[in-house]
Amino acid sequence: QAEAQRLQEQNREFEQQNEERQCKVCYDRMADSMFTPCNHGVCAECMAEIRRRPVRYGQRRSCPFCREVIRGTATIRFS
């Protein structure tokens, strides 16, 4: 029974890690993660799409989660 509990715990940790590496916009696994200044992570493709969207006069690009203005990002590569 101790072995079964250990395996269940490992499975939970694995599931959590996979969820953390999932883009919350497109739900694909993130190989290249981009983080907004407000620390929300999206995949590089979604961030590129956010940056390609036309910005209307007086508006700025914003985080799809909290709407904070996006001025810069950091890229993280997962292996």
Image: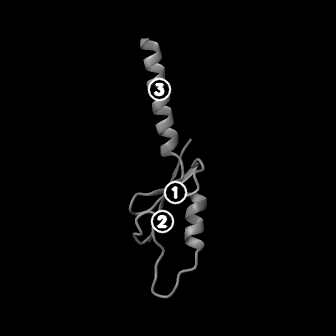
Q: Disc 2 on helix, strand or loop?
A: loop
Indicate the amino acid at tag 1. Val
- In the picture, measured across the screen, residue 18 lies left or right of residue 9, that is right
- In the picture, measured across the screen, residue 2 lies left or right of residue 52, that is left
Question: Which of 78 and 53 lies nearest the eye of the viewer?
Answer: 53
- Residue position marked by numbered label 3 in the rendering: 10
Query: Residue 7 placed where, x, y %?
Result: 48, 21
**Circle 2: is it few (<14), some (14-19), or many (20+) Cα within 10 Å?**
some
- Residue position marked by numbered label 1 in the rendering: 42
Q: Disc 1 on helix, strand or loop?
A: strand
> Tag 3 or tag 1, which sits nearer the N-term?
3
The residue at 52%/84% (across/down) is: 56
- Residue position marked by numbered label 2 in the rendering: 64
Query: Residue 31 placed where, x, y %?
Result: 58, 48
Q: Disc 3 on helix, strand or loop?
A: helix
How far apart in space, not on screen, are marks 2 and 1 (Cα)? 10 Å
**Circle 1: is it few (<14), some (14-19), or many (20+) Cα within 10 Å?**
many
The residue at 49%/88% (across/down) is: 57
Q: Quadrant of residue 68?
A: bottom left
Is the image coloured rainbow, by chain, by secondary structure, or in one colour? one colour
Query: Residue 10 placed where, x, y %?
Result: 47, 26
